[in-house]
């Protein structure tokens, strides 16, 4: 695995962890808005998808 791939995998792992924490916070603090907020955050982070020029 190349260094760049390792860095990308680590960044994706960190983003997934952040999304999990944010989803838990939203569920606890804003339960009525949590589905919309966590969905929007997932789209903004684009975790697990290739961005422009990505593979």
Image (tube, rainbow, N blue to C red):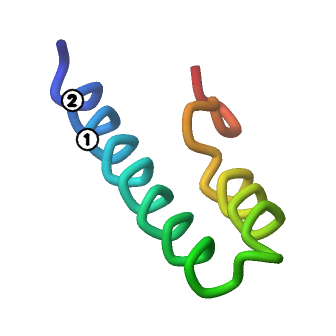
* Quarter placement of the N terminus: top left
Please tell me whether residue 45 is drawn above or below residue 34 in the rendered image: above
Most extreme residue toward the top is 1
Residue labelled with disc 2 = 6
7 or 28: nearer the eye? Answer: 28
Residue matched to label 1: 10
In this picture, residue 34 sits left or right of residue 50: right
- Residue ID at (28%, 25%): 5
Across and down, in percent, residue 26 comes to 61, 76
Q: Residue at x 78, y 61 (%)?
A: 35
Residues at marks 2 and 1 touching, judged by CB atoms closer than 8 Å: yes
- Give percent across and percent down for residue 10: 25, 41
Looking at this view, is 21 or 3 the one in front?
21
In what element is the residue under mark 2?
helix
Estimate the spatial distance between the alpha carbons at disc 2 and disc 1, rounded to whole Å: 6 Å
Q: Position of residue 4 (x, y in %)?
A: 26, 31
Q: Quarter-wise, where is residue 8 in the image? A: top left
Q: Residue at x 56, y 42 (%)?
A: 47
Left or right: residue 35 versus residue 54 is right
Q: Residues within 10 Å of mark 1 (few under 14, many from 20)?
A: few
Quadrant for the C terminus in the image: top right
| Marker disc for residue 31 | none
What crowding class fits label 2: few (fewer than 14 Cα within 10 Å), some (14-19), or many (20 or more)? few
Give the residue drawn at x 36%, y 53%. 17
Task: Give the total number of marks visible in the rendering.
Answer: 2
Q: Is residue 47 above or below residue 33?
A: above
Residue 22 at x, y percent in the picture: 50, 70
- 2 vs 1, front mark: 1
């Amino acid at each position: 695995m190349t260094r760049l791939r390792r860095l990308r995998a680590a960044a994706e792992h960190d983003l997934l962890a952040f999304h999990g924490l944010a989803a838990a916070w939203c569920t606890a603090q804003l339960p009525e808005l949590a589905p919309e907020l966590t969905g929007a955050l997932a789209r903004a982070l684009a975790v697990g998808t290739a961005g422009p020029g990505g593979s």
